[in-house]
Image (tube, rainbow, N blue to C red):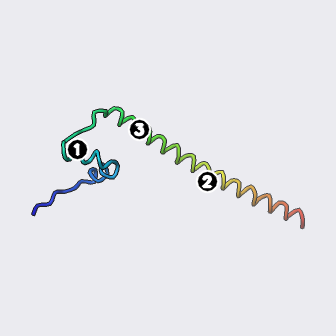
Amino acid sequence: MSYRIIKASEIGEYVYCRRAWWLRKTYDYRPQNIEELTAGTTYHQQHGQQVYLAHLGRRIALVFLFLAITVLVFWVLSQMI
């Protein structure tokens, strides 16, 4: 019994789209719109970076808000003493 080696890229292709993987394996069908696929991949990578930066900015803002509230509380408490 011979086993065929499955590459990581094949697993990625299968997870992304089972139908595309099956068409390529069964009929050796390859997509014709390579430029559009590349543009879509680039767009999604850029969007992912924007989402990451937005989350990072939100976390930084929350840290500064926490620090500002902490300073305000200590200032109010020091005025009461």
Seen from the viewer's position, the closer of residues 10 and 45 is 10
Label 2 to label 3, Cα distance in Å? Answer: 26 Å
Image position of 8 with respect to 41: above or below: below
Q: Nearer the viewer, mark 2 or mark 3?
A: 3
Q: Is residue 70 left or right of residue 13?
A: right
Image position of 15 with respect to 76: above or below: above
Q: Nearer the viewer, mark 1 or mark 2?
A: 1
The numbered mark at residue 42 is: 3
Q: Which residue matches tag 2?
A: 59
Q: How far from the left and from the top, in percent, is residue 30?
A: 24, 38
Q: Are marks 2 and 3 in contact (CB under 8 Å)?
A: no
Q: How far from the left and from the top, in percent, is residue 19?
A: 29, 47
Identify residue type, mark 1.
Arg
The numbered mark at residue 24 is: 1
Q: Earlier in the sequence, mark 2 or mark 3?
A: 3
Seen from the viewer's position, the closer of residues 10 and 22 is 22
* Mark 3 surroundings: few (<14), some (14-19) or many (≥20) residues within 10 A: few
Q: Residue furthest bottom?
A: 81
Q: Nearer the viewer, mark 1 or mark 3?
A: 1
